Image (cartoon, coloured by chain):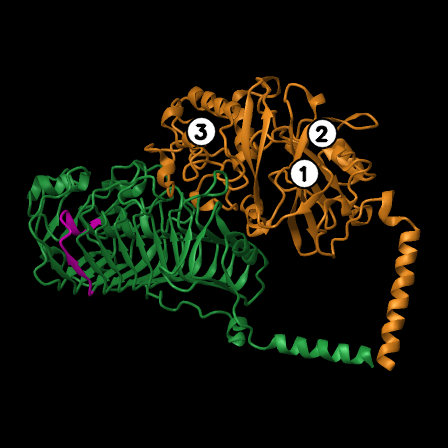
Amino acid sequence: MRIVSRIAFVFAVAGIALAAFYSTGCNTNGGINVDIAKDAFEKLSDYNFFKGKMADLVPNDGLLPYDLNSTLFSDYAEKARFVWVPKEALTADGATNYDERGLVNLPVGAVLVKNFYYPVDFRDAAKGRRIMETRLLIHRESGWEAETYVWNDEQTEAVREIAGAQKPVSFINAKGEKVNVTYGVPNKNQCLGCHEMGGKFTPIGPKVGNLDRDYNYAEAKQNQLTKWASLGYITGLPKKAGTIHTYPVWNNPATGSLDERARAYLDINCAHCHNPKGPAKNSGLDLSFTNRDALSYGIGKAPIAAGAGSGDNMIDIAPGHPENSILNYRLESTNPEVMMPELGRTIVHTEGVELIREWVASMTVSQP
Amino acid sequence: MKFLSAASLFIILVIASCGRPTPVYIKDAKALQEALINAKLGDTVYVDEGTIEFTSSLSMVDKKHITIKGKGMGKTILSFKGMAKGTGGEGLKVSNCEDVLVCDLTLRDMKGDGFKAAECFNITMRRLQVLWSNPNDSTNGAYGLYPVTSTNVIVEDCEVSNASDAGIYVGQSYHCIVRRNKAHDNVAGIEIENCQNVDVYENECYNNTGGLLAFNLPDIPEKNGHSVRIFKNKLHDNNLANFAPIGNTVAIVPAGTGFFVMATPNVEVFDNEFSNNKTVNCGIISYMTSGKEIKDPAYNPFISAVSIHDNKFSKQPALPDTSRSMGKALAAAFQGNSPDIAYDGFVNPALLVDGKLPEDKRICIRNNGNATFANLDIAGGMKNISTDIAAHDCSLTGVPEYKAADVKVPSPVMNAKK
């Protein structure tokens, strides 16, 4: 009988606590609901990241939208990115919190929220969009962890998926052509395929050089680095202007030279694996924006384990000759054995391929 | 009291479920992928008999002490024929794991490699069959079994065929054992590349382009491979026309190669049987002979410290494969009677002491029955080809003691669970 009464007591206490919780309205429209100590929610709506109609992706208080200068190609999917850093997670020591490659080390408790969607018609945003999935990177005590939520056809909810999925989708591209894509939702391990660095799960996008651009915030237009610094998300930024190596926008010649734009494109599309600590380090190829060593950048470099990926070419980048370069061959292929990147794309990125062709063709001998 | 009886029933159930559970055999692709994602320390994931069709790569990341076990080669078949684009090239990929055993499965028709294990510590591949349906097809995946950048690697009792590069390829790894495998109808049967401390024994390699290769290659992080023992292997009838895509290192290998060692020091080759490899049963070469340019200043392309002893050689007269430079050189000098053992004649000038190689850096060839030999003098433009085997009658002394077989046992956590 003592056991029974104890159980009853526990239930009573829990009931009061629950009642108190709901009466304060914590879980309605009040705020974002993230507890990094708990397992991931099964439904995206449970996090309360967005207010109003979830598919409008209007951020709740504290969820900050951001953009990058150059972005990963994912079968032409567009991305709406947000970062969440709870105030209590911030430290005030002011020490630099980004590494030599510029990657911002967001504190435990932070969450990156990335929504993948296709406009119905790339020429007219008013025609609406189809959100495919929302990926979360959650910074837990044990490290970063990836979760992905696949949106339903009604666009009212997204449900957690760990084993991956393939979803057919079609859209009208910028040239007015209809494109059919089998959009791939990665499984949890495939997330690591790109996000692993030296054995640890690591975000890819938020590097200072890639964040260095203006954003139209609800209040006013502001440089993202300035904004992130004012919120304490980035600390230790250099005071002097021009000391950050800003990534150009790969398809905007006004933002950088052909060489800079090509390297920014290869950085964001390839260097998450092809760097000295990444999953493809065994290839010896380092396509980081910061790498200025010709051989390890692929210029004149022989392949090691390319298999059919060599396409009967002898070297990665043959200056002046994209038609003899393994790099171009692999970017232009959709054969799973050949194509690079090997995850996250099923079609050729025509505009990116043109950029890299033009760049390799423009190279003379051994450009460092 | 009702409460109490319900509680005690619950306890009984919990205790009952703590007993040895009957294995749950997975039957479909999605459930298997989920099982590999959710696997906990010490788990065994069982895969049922039958063919499971995959539309994407299967993977496991960041796990410790996991066994993936099927019901046997040819019984549990993972087919990757229907792999969709953008889902990865490999059949199975295991990365950043510790103490992993994968056994008793067939993997077939991958778009890329069969089973890649990267950044693993204690990885065992046992009784795995890896194959592609189409023979001689350059669009087959490159490697069948592909442990890379790993430590304590065992590949044993496996069978690999029709790979467009190497059937079993161990790359940039440390402390590896490759034993009792069969590799046939691949471009290379077994390739050990840039590894340190490796034992390769009791394997049978036949009907490949090249049976067994031990290579050091430039332009990669680990280019300092050394200490490889090759013993009690049967390397025979490796006369398959090379179907590797050009640009890959194995594309330089002439059909009819039993064994090639290239630029790897401290290699001991003994108690093997070499027979009917038409171009050369055993080749000893520096990277220069590959015809490839060397741009990596940190790479040593020279061959040194090799001992070939107590092997059996036999060979029927046959023309070497003249489509590759090494075969062309042999055919020019010897027509249909190429030697069992050929050395390209390169000597690293930096190693010479008073004009001679020290005892621990020589190329030693001794006690191989009636094996024929040639120094092709490729270094000197083939002007002084010599068949004087006595010039290599030595045994290597002073090489650092070799320690491949001390592969570490599984961690105490694993032992305690047994």
Q: Earlier in the sequence, mark 3 or mark 1?
A: 1
Q: Residue drawn at (77%, 49%), measured in percent from left and top?
A: A34
- Residue numbers of the magenta segment: B271-284
Secondary structure found at label 2: loop
Tell me the shade of chain B.
Answer: green
Question: At label 3, which amino acid type do we have?
Answer: Glu
Q: Position of residue A85 (x, y in %)?
A: 77, 44
Chain under callout 1: A
Q: Earlier in the sequence, mark 1 or mark 2?
A: 1
Q: Nearer the viewer, residue B341 or B350?
A: B341
Number of numbered tags placed on the structure image: 3
Q: Earlier in the sequence, mark 2 or mark 3?
A: 2
Mark 1 Cα shell of 10 Å, populated few (<14), some (14-19), many (≥20): many
Secondary structure found at label 1: strand
Q: Which residue is mark 2?
A: A240
Q: CA distance from mark 3 to mark 1?
A: 26 Å
Is residue B357 placed above or below B249 in the rendered structure? below
Q: In this orientation, does residue B318 appear?
A: yes
Chain under callout 2: A
Q: Nearer the viewer, residue B325 or B136?
A: B136
Name the disc covering residue A332, or none: 3
Chain appearing in orange on the rendered image: A
- The answer to whether residue A165 is left or right of residue A11 is left
Q: Which residue is mark 1?
A: A114
Query: Are both tags, 3 and 1, on one chain?
Result: yes
Question: At label 1, which amino acid type do we have?
Answer: Lys
Quarter of the image where one finds residue B232 = bottom left
Magenta span contains residue B274: yes
